Image (cartoon, rainbow, N blue to C red):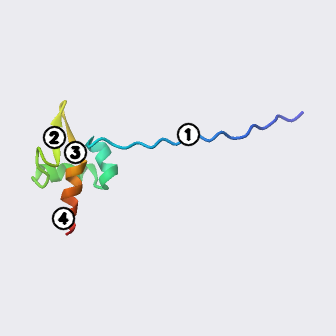
Amino acid sequence: MTPKTQPAIAAPQVVVTPSRYVTIDLAVHITGFSRRAIEGKIARGVWLLGRQYKKADGGILIDIKEYEKWAEKATA
């Protein structure tokens, strides 16, 4: 007696639209910059507090809209 095979069930796809403000860990994936590069831009004042990033709950949140504006200016 051979066991019957059941058809594979495809896992549902999940599409996530990130918030305007994201953690550095998520910003790494969105921007393509490493954590070290992002932290360096903050430390050197390339990205400004209140513009490209905010401090909240003891951490740093990257403003994706402002990052995109910065990136457009940097390549113009």
Which residue is located at x 22 percent, y 60 percent? 71
Which residue is located at x 21 percent, y 46 percent? 63
- Front residue of 55/66: it is 66
Q: Name the residue under label 1.
A: 12
* Of labels 1 and 3, the one closer to you: 1
**C-alpha gap between disc 2 and disc 4:** 21 Å
Of callouts 1 and 3, the N-terminal one: 1
Task: Count the numbered circles shown.
Answer: 4
**C-alpha gap between disc 4 and disc 1:** 38 Å
**C-alpha gap between disc 4 and disc 3:** 17 Å
Q: What residue type is labelled 2?
A: Lys
Q: Classify 64 as above or below 23.
A: below
- Front residue of 69/46: it is 69
- The secondary element bearing badge 3 is classed as strand
Q: Left or right: 14 with respect to 70? A: right
The tag on residue 74 is: 4
Q: Which amino acid does label 4 sit on?
A: Ala
- The secondary element bearing badge 1 is classed as loop
Q: Mark 3 points at which residue?
A: 62
Q: Which amino acid does label 1 sit on?
A: Pro
Of callouts 4 and 1, the N-terminal one: 1
The tag on residue 54 is: 2
Of callouts 2 and 4, the N-terminal one: 2
Q: Left or right: 52 with respect to 22? A: left
User: Which of the image's four quarters has the C terminus?
Assistant: bottom left
For disc 3, the neighbor class at 10 Å (few under 14, some 14 to 19, many from 20) is many
Dot 1 and dot 2 residues touching (CB under 8 Å): no
* Of labels 1 and 2, the one closer to you: 1
